[in-house]
Image (cartoon, coloured by chain):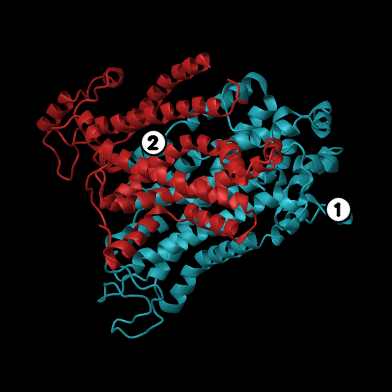
Amino acid sequence: MSDERTPQVPTEEGRGQDPWGAGEPALTPRGTPQRPPVSARRGDEIHAFPETAVGEGDVRTEGSTAAPARGTSLWRDAWKRLLKNRLAVFGMFVVAFIAVAVIVGPWVIKAATGFTYDYQPPGRQQSYPPFTAPDGSFSWTHPMGTDAAGRDMLARVLQGGRISLMVGVISTFVSILIGLTWGATAGYLGGKVDDLLMRIVDVLYAIPYMMIVIVLLAFFGGRGPLQQIFLLFTALGAVSWLTMARIVRGQVISLKNQEYVLAARATGVSTPKIIFRHIVPNALGPVIVYATLTIPSVMLQEAFLSFLGLGVQAPYASWGSLAQEGIQNIAVFPWQLIFPGVTMALTLFSLNFLGDGLRDALDPQMRKF
Amino acid sequence: MFRFIVRRLLVTLPMVLIVITLTWALIRLAPGNFYASERKLPAAIEKNIRAKYGLDDPWYVQYRKVMLNILSLDFGNSLRYETETVNDVLRRTVPVSAAVGTCAYLLALLVGTTMGTLAALKQNSKTDYAAMGLSMLGISMPNFVLGPILVLIFSLSLYWLPPARWGGFPSWNMVLPVLTLSAIYMAYIARLTRAGMLEVLRSDYIRTARAKGLTERQVVMRHALRGGLLPVVSFTGPALAILITGTVVVERIFALPGLGTYFINANLNRDEPLILGIVAFTSVLVLVFNLLVDIAYGFIDPRIRY
């Protein structure tokens, strides 16, 4: 519909009509033959019984309700393919490690050394380099050194990671909620509604929304650290759902003409129920993939805003605000920037690899060779 | 084609007005005032200030005034830099941001397409993996980490380049900001080029070109690049959006007197005319750029119909 009006890059749906490529298996990485498109395979598995369709398309039920006798389900296939991708596995391990470290770490440090992100040891409020005791000798007390106020950097980096990851995950969740509803409605209803909804998305695409987010945070922020974080979730979620809506719409259009939807309609299931119980669960693959790639981009935006002093406020810290504090003293105390900065870069790096790997595994149709 | 351009232009103006209205509404709905400070103002002075800026008028009168100002391209005086109009500030800051941004984009285009093409030509080789690993690093490395690290190396350790400040258009001061800003574009462009080239390289017309007996160089330079770079062309629009957020951060790191620095300060100072002026300027820029990209797209790729 809208594709006819605006010139666009040939879309993913347009390409790769022949999922087996030009019969050149040598061109796919590591010799894995490409599989038929997800939608095609998913269709013949489940279209007979809408109820099963919900269960099988849903991640949460993976391995439990799916009949093991059938051998490979979509999700198990994808999992196998993911494990073959070394970079994605590396990314998965690093992300898991950082997530655990960030969640458990602050408590462990508090128990072990007594330091928290906002504890200033009395009498020695100055910066110590990594692995250095107050008298200059080697010590394990501060593996990342301390910041200008004498607070332990490791505790601060871990606490900052909590907030950064939380903003990333929650904002992505907000963007999924909006994008999924918007895209599924447009795709399923089609016609004028589709035209209108996608036109709005096109229009929003062209707005320099980060400027509006900056205005929003500058004017409505500063009421309190917790409100500020909440504002971040909403603002970042509200501006990152556009691509999600497009992806969902494409998926829904390709799914809505399948027989199981027809069956559901014939048995008198209501439209919202068809969309959310029968179509959305089957469109989840690309949604998960894109969500994994949205998390790092949202985290990056949060870090930008915090770096500019508009995001997370003291006493809380995020990787962006830690970097901003670190840059003040970069010539003398470079570790105060390098540790939060490199931790963040490593996390984003791994998340991006994981997302790329998931895309290759879950959605071979979208694979960029 | 002509109808398409006219229609797009007709959409563009209302969109700029919507963006400005939204920004204005946000500014006005927020509690507090630009003249508020730690010290409480005497009531008489506050009354005079409110009268001078028309803050007690009904909202639609104020809104009309703002919109008329913007439509006549006269944004009024900045509230903070009182001797300067918003247009003065724009005239002073835009060249700085534009110089850094354009250089960064050109550098990224050059390096990114080269990297992407090489990676695509030698798919799954060491070159490919190195190029793609590097570009993933470029996407993942926040520029406020990359910038300071470059400063640490090239300014504070090697003493080769100045660490900050603006030194005029062609100057050594520009090197580090441009490198910092271009990293993320370079990475995106390299990935887009690789994907586009891989797709084109296996298409029929490339096979035909090879079968005609053209050299590999001719096949790549004359036939493949044209199709393979299409995704890069369409990236130019989003690139501008990244550029705008990117320059805000990079200008902060390198203390450049550009648009981004002033935008952040204007927000912190609640300098309404300046905020609206900068938002209007960038919105028009982004929208016009998107339009130009769409038009250019039609010329490069004859398959596109309007």
**Residue farthest front in this picture:** B213
Q: Are marks 1 and 2 on the same chain?
A: yes
Q: Position of residue B205 (x, y in %)?
A: 68, 35
Q: Which chain is red?
A: B
Kind of residue indicated by mark 2: Ile
Q: Residue at x 17, y 36 (%)?
A: B81
Q: Residue at x 20, y 31 (%)?
A: B88
**Residue farthest right in this picture:** A69
Residue A208 occupies quadrant:
top left
* Mark linked to residue A212: 2
- The chain that hosts pointer 2 is A
Mark 1–mark 2 Cα distance, whole angstroms, equals: 50 Å
Find chain A in the image and tell me its colour.
Answer: cyan
Residue at which label 1 appears: A67
Does residue A247 appear anywhere in the picture?
Answer: yes
Around disc 2, counting alpha carbons within 10 Å, would you say few (fewer than 14), some (14 to 19), or many (20 or more)? some
